[in-house]
Image (tube, rainbow, N blue to C red):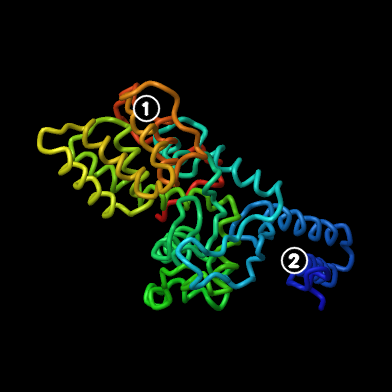
Amino acid sequence: MLFLDQESDTYDPSKFQFFVWAAVAGGFQWKHPRSPSSCAKVFAYGMTVNLLCNLIPLSHNHMPAPLRNPDINTAPSHAGAGPNSYTQYKLRNAADQDTARADVLRVAGNGSFVSKCLLMITRHGSSKQFVTITGQDGLTWGIKDFISDSVHPFFAKLDAALPGVIDSVFAEHADKLRSSQWLNKRIDKRNDRGLVTIGWLRRGLDEILCDRRFHGLQLHQFIGEAVVPSRKIFDEAGFRLAFSLAAMVGVANSFGATGMAGRLRAARQEVGPSGGEREIIQSFCSAYARRDDGGHEGSTERLIKRGFELESGPLPDVDTLGHSGRRIRALFLLFPWADRESFNEPGDFALEADEKFPEPA
C-alpha cells in the first residue's frame, strides 16, 4: 500500500505527510503555472513544518519496547503452581537490563527523601524497575510493583493529563481501561491469573512502561500510594525521624497504607504505653524483617541489633537475608539510625523535563 512502511507493514505517517505537501505544492503550481519557484517554496515550507512537528512529541509515538523473556505475547504459564511461582517478563538483553537499572539510579540520584525511599524499595534498581511486569498476585508492574488495583487509577491519570495516548496504544480496547467496572470484574489476585492473562493489556502496558516519558507518572502514583498516606500516619503518631517515615513507606509498599497502619498499631501495643518513637519503630522494623526470614533468622537478628546500634559489627550480607530483611538493610544504609535525621520535606526526583508528569489543568 502507498502509505505503509514496507518493513513493518504499518502505517507510515511521514509518507502520507510527504504526499499531502506534494499535492499542495502541485495545486499551487496548477493555479500559478508561471511561478515554479513559488511552488518549490511552498513544498519546502511544508516539509519544514512537517519536520518540526515530528520533532515535538505532541502525542504518544509507538516506539518498540525492548524484547522480553518470555516474549510479552506469551501467556503466563504458572497458574496454580504455588505461591512462589509466577511468570516474570524479564528484559532479554543485558544492555536493556543495564539501562532499566540505570534509569532508576538516575531519577533517584539527587539525595532527596523520596529518592532515597525509591532506592530502598527497589534495592537500587536491582529488584524493581520502571519496566517490571510479572504475574505475581495477578499482575505486578512498574517501579513500585503496582498491583491490579492500580491499573485504573494509573491510566485515568494518564488519560486526563495526556488525552489520546490510551487510544493510540490500546486502540479498540481503550474504553475498557477507562472502565473500573470492566477491570474489577477481571481482577484475580492469584499468581498468573486475572489481568496479566489479557494479551492486549500486557502489550500496551509494556509499551507504556518502557517509555521513559511516563516515568514521572509512575513516580506520581508511587508517592500517592505509599508516601502521602504514610506521612499522614507519621504526623498523627507524632514521630519526627526520617528513618521512621522511610520505614513506614517501605512497609506500605508491601501491604498498602492500611496494612502498614495495622502493623504500626501492633508495634505500639507490643512496646506498651511507655514506648517512644525509637521503641515502636524498632518493633515495627523487626516484625517486618522477620515475616519471611525462614532460614535466615540469625542474620535477621543481627541486622536488627546492629542497625539499631544494640550491638557492634557490620550489617549482614544481603544474600543472607529474606526479601523483607533486605529492604530493612537498605533502610539502615540509606537512613542510618545513628544520624537520627529529622524529616523535613519529601523533595522530588531527578527527572528530565519530558519525564515529568504534567498535572491536568
The mark that comes first in sequence, 2 or 1, is 2
Q: Is residue 12 left or right of residue 352?
A: right
* Label 1, residues with CA under 10 Å away: few <14, some 14-19, many ≥20: some
Residue 255 percent across, percent down from the top left: 34, 54
Please give the label number shown on residue 306: 1
Q: Is residue 80 above or below residue 329?
A: below
Task: Name the amino acid, label 1.
Answer: Arg
Q: Is residue 203 left or right of residue 195?
A: right
Q: Quadrant of residue 280?
A: top left
State how far apart marks 2 and 1 are (Cα).
66 Å
Residue 216 percent across, percent down from the top left: 49, 48
Q: Element at badge 1?
A: helix
Task: Name the amino acid, label 2.
Answer: Gln
Q: Is residue 343 above or below residue 198?
A: above
Closer to us: mark 2 or mark 1?
1
Q: Quadrant of the C terminus?
A: bottom left
Q: Is residue 144 left or right of residue 340?
A: right
Q: Is residue 135 above or below residue 100?
A: below
The residue nearer to you, when weighing 326 against 162, is 326
Q: Measuring 61% from the left and 47% from the top, which residue is drawn there?
A: 100
Q: Element at badge 2?
A: helix
Pointer 2 residue: 17
Q: Quadrant of residue 206?
A: bottom right
Residue 110 percent across, percent down from the top left: 49, 31
Q: Measuring 80% from the left and 71% from the top, which residue is drawn there?
A: 23
* Label 2, residues with CA under 10 Å away: few <14, some 14-19, many ≥20: some
